[in-house]
Amino acid sequence: MLHLGIDIKGKRVDQNKINLYLQQREAKKRFEEWENKTFQFLCDLYHRLSEWKKIEDPKKDEYIYALKNIDYVSYLIDEFFIYGTDEEKLWFKRNYRKKVDEWQKILI
């Protein structure tokens, strides 16, 4: 015995707590990946709409679409991804999934 004052027979860490911690950490990682991917996508969309807005031909579908959506996309970026809380981002994820899918088709 080394008499270091360490109780090696002390409390063991509960395996359920370890598993819960690992699950929470993985969920946080997935959420952050989604957040980064969606933020980048919205920024790319904003830049694409900015380019379309420069066309300045009222008969062009891209120009009209850009005029209708560029301010809205800018609002979403600011409100949810720059100034938003994690709860607001989660709300966005749940409620804007279809709209983001629609916009993704534009960038293809």
Image: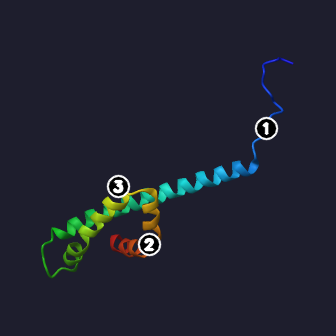
Q: Which residue occupies the extreme top position in the image?
A: 2
Name the image quarter holding the N terminus: top right
Earlier sequence position, callout 1 versus callout 2? 1
Amino acid at the residue labelled 2: Asn
User: In the shown orientation, is residue 55 left or right of residue 23?
Assistant: left
Amino acid at the residue labelled 3: Tyr
Would you call the spot at circle 1 few (<14 residues within 10 Å), some (14-19), or many (20 or more)? few
The numbered mark at residue 11 is: 1
Q: Quadrant of residue 28?
A: bottom right
Q: In the image, is residue 98 above or below residue 10?
A: below
User: In the shown orientation, is residue 91 left or right of residue 103?
Assistant: right
Q: In the image, is residue 39 above or below residue 101?
A: above
Asked if the residue at tag 2 contacts the one at tag 1, i.e. Cβ–Cβ closer than 8 Å, the answer is no
Which residue is tagged 3?
Answer: 83
Local SS, label 2: helix
Residue at image location 12% in from the left, 73% down from the top: 56
Spatial separation of the CA atoms under disc 3 and disc 2? 18 Å
Amino acid at the residue labelled 1: Lys
Q: How many marks?
A: 3
The numbered mark at residue 94 is: none
The numbered mark at residue 95 is: 2
Relative to the observer, which residue lies in front, 95 or 107?
Answer: 95
Earlier sequence position, callout 3 versus callout 2? 3
Residue at image location 57% in from the left, 57% down from the top: 27
Residue at image location 41% in from the left, 72% down from the top: 96
Residue at image location 23% in from the left, 75% down from the top: 68
